[in-house]
Image: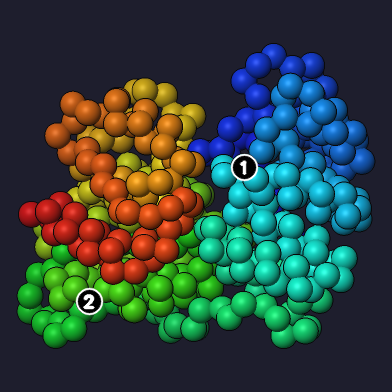
């Protein structure tokens, strides 16, 4: 079973409650039960949580997950529907709900709900392609179309990690010219299918900009993602190679993260500042658990946050960043008209045009 589990302390998502709770019902205690695979005990604890004053989206989300893990698909569907009513966990709740429908044999609801999860921002295409919970839907030929497969070059880094990457050159590319460069981190699991989506939906089909070169990167270790120290060194080796192969304006890159791609984009823009001209984060906010000091250090580079005008999920986190960084000359908040979560407008020319404008300014 590969149903999607959000950690209770995941960035930009609330804990079960900020109020005092009994020790056995605390987020930490329930997370431990889930991590240890003690799903029956987790169900008992979470059912107490949702019946009391501490119920919120994360409580219903994890109850649906735990019930699914015990094979109680009807109970998982009931809790999943409740969880999907909370914006902060809506996309992943819908995905897990689709898995429960799939295993319960309701393929019509599974297909409809899976498509809804993707429209709300669930973009782990590698998981969608391989998740055994979706096998009934897959066998029926009812999985949504996945992105076109792209070709990738592979850099063997000095630490023996392989870094797959794809360079998107603008129309009329001139190898003798200097261009602003974007280093782009895909959402989802940062693996091949996720990178395929970013290339197809964000850049190749919507770029239309003759001034930028974009490098889409995949995590060297698919099982661990980007957030490992060896991956950081491998990424720097790739940036050195790109600077050798191309004329990079200012010898630096704008680090760009879309949705969950914000995590490596934010982290590596700070760890590799000598390579970064700035940071752009779209449709996601940097970790709300960061201290004020850490947030202020973030803006030692030019930082641009792009969100939707009606995106309730990140509004509070965005406002906190705005208040902390309002005195930073390099901080900028931009909005695109749209409603909620991912925003269809963020996937096309509106986002890319805004990104291009920011990157050109940062590369000056």
Give the number of marks.
2
Under circle 2, the secondary element is loop
Q: Which residue is mark 1?
A: 86
The answer to whether residue 116 is visible is yes
Alpha-carbon neighbours of circle 1 within 10 Å: few (<14), some, or many (≥20)?
Answer: some
Relative to the observer, which residue lies in front, 11 or 344?
344
Q: Which image quadrant for residue 332?
A: top left
Residue shown at 22%/64% (left/top)? 353
- Horizontal relation, residue 157 to residue 86: left or right: left
- Label number found at residue 191: none
Residue shown at 36%/63% (left/top)? 345
Q: How is the image coloured?
A: rainbow
- Horizontal relation, residue 125 to residue 356: left or right: right
Q: Which image quadrant for residue 364?
A: bottom left
Q: Position of residue 150 (x, y in %)?
A: 45, 83
Image: 43 above or below 97:
above
Image: 132 above or below 47:
below
Q: Earlier in the sequence, mark 2 or mark 1?
A: 1
- Horizontal relation, residue 324 to residue 67: left or right: left
Q: Of the residues tagged 2 and 1, which is closer to the observer?
A: 1
Q: CA distance from mark 2 to mark 1?
A: 36 Å
Image: 296 above or below 168:
above
The answer to whether residue 301 is visible is no
Relative to the observer, which residue lies in front, 80 or 173?
80
- Label number found at residue 208: 2
Q: Which image quadrant for residue 207?
A: bottom left
- Horizontal relation, residue 244 to residue 87: left or right: left
Q: Position of residue 122 (x, y in %)?
A: 57, 59
Residue shown at 19%/31% (left/top)? 328
Image: 198 above or below 64:
below
Residue shown at 86%/71% (left/top)? 105
Q: Position of residue 144 (x, y in %)?
A: 62, 77
């Amino acid at each position: 079973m590969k149903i999607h589990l959000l950690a209770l302390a995941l960035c930009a998502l609330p804990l079960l409650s900020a109020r005092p709770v009994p020790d056995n019902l605390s987020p930490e205690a329930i997370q431990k039960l889930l991590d240890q695979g003690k799903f029956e005990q987790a169900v008992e604890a979470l059912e107490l949580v949702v019946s009391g004053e501490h119920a919120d989206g994360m409580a219903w989300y994890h109850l649906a997950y735990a019930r699914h893990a015990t094979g109680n698909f009807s109970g998982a569907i009931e809790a999943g529907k409740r969880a999907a009513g909370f914006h902060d966990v809506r996309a992943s709740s819908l995905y897990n709900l689709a898995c429960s429908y799939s295993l319960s044999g309701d393929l019509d609801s599974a297909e409809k709900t899976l498509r809804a999860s993707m429209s709300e921002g669930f973009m782990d295409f590698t998981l969608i392609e391989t998740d055994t919970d979706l096998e009934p839907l897959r066998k029926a030929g009812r999985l949504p179309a996945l992105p076109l497969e792209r070709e990738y070059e592979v850099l063997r880094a000095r630490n023996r990690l392989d870094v797959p990457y794809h360079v998107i050159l603008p129309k009329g590319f001139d190898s003798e010219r200097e261009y602003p460069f974007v280093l782009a981190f895909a959402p989802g699991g940062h693996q091949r299918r996720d990178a395929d989506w970013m290339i197809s939906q964000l850049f190749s089909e919507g770029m239309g900009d003759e001034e930028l070169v974009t490098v889409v990167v995949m995590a060297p270790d698919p099982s661990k993602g980007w957030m490992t120290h060896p991956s950081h060194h491998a990424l720097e080796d790739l940036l050195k190679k790109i600077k050798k192969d191309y004329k990079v304006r200012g010898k630096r890159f704008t680090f760009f993260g879309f949705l969950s791609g914000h995590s490596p984009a934010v982290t590596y823009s700070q760890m590799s500042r000598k390579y970064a001209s700035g940071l752009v984060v779209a449709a996601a906010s940097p970790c709300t658990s960061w201290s004020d000091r850490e947030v202020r250090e973030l803006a030692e580079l030019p930082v641009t946050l792009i969100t939707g005008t009606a995106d309730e999920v990140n509004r509070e986190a965005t406002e906190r960043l705005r208040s902390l960084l309002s005195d930073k000359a390099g901080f900028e908040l931009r909005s695109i008209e749209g409603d909620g979560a991912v925003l269809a407008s963020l996937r096309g020319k509106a986002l890319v045009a805004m990104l291009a404008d920011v990157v050109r300014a940062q590369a000056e």
